[in-house]
Image: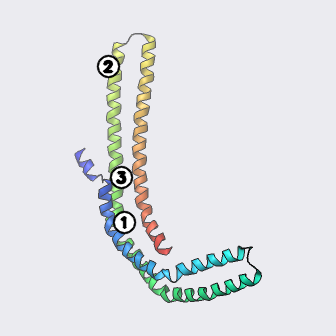
Amino acid sequence: MANENSNILTAEQEMKLRQPIEDYVGKIQKKVDKLRVDGTDRVVEIQNLMDSIKRDRTLTKGEKESRLAKCKTELEAAKAVEAKNKDEVSKLITDAENYLKAHFDKDYYQAVKASCAAEKAAAKARHQQKVAELEKEHKATMAKLSDHQEIKDENYVYKNRIFDAKMTMEKEFQEAKDRRHAAFSYRYHLIDLLRM
């Protein structure tokens, strides 16, 4: 049991494994964000502004056209900045994706996956031990009973305790599965942030 527990990662240990990846990709994310401020972010902002102007019923046709013309010139400038930074942004994103491909699985995910498998094995062992204890208790109690109703009640209580133990094990299985899934999806979360 002690060997199994050493394979199970705590949340802090998991974060320590993930920290170098977060740091590296985080630096790249900051560079990408700086490059997108005057380009892509501004394009999205202007397009939203243009959509709101088009929907605005309080403006006259001339006001709408003048505001849209102003937005179009700003949009062209923002698109020029976006095009200028596009190659550098794509290089940074590729660098981050290559880093994730090289390090995420071997440095982080495999350790979490092994930890989750060890957690499941430990939960199963605890469940089997609990069931054995319950069965031993049940047999000892049944040996003392003679009344039919008491025997029936004890059997009912025993089944409920077995069911509770099973539910506890399944809950622990689900927690391990959720941790493994969160670790797996974290990689794609980072990639989504980089790509917007």
Residue bearing mark 3:
116
Q: Residue furthest top?
A: 147
What residue is drawn where x is 43% and y is 21%? 155
Pointer 2 local density, CA inside 10 Å: few below 14, some 14–19, many at least 20: few
Residue bearing mark 2:
140
What residue is drawn where x is 23% and y is 48%? 3
| Image disc number at residue 105 | 1
Its colouring scheme is rainbow
**Viewer-proximal residue among 189 and 59:** 59
**Amino acid type of the residue tagged 3 in the rendering:** Cys
Q: Are marks 3 and 1 in contact (CB under 8 Å)?
A: no
Disc 3 is placed on an element classified as: helix
Distance from Cα at disc 3 to Cα at disc 1: 15 Å
User: Please, is residue 79 above or below residue 128 in the view?
Assistant: below
Pointer 1 local density, CA inside 10 Å: few below 14, some 14–19, many at least 20: some
**Amino acid type of the residue tagged 2 in the rendering:** Ala
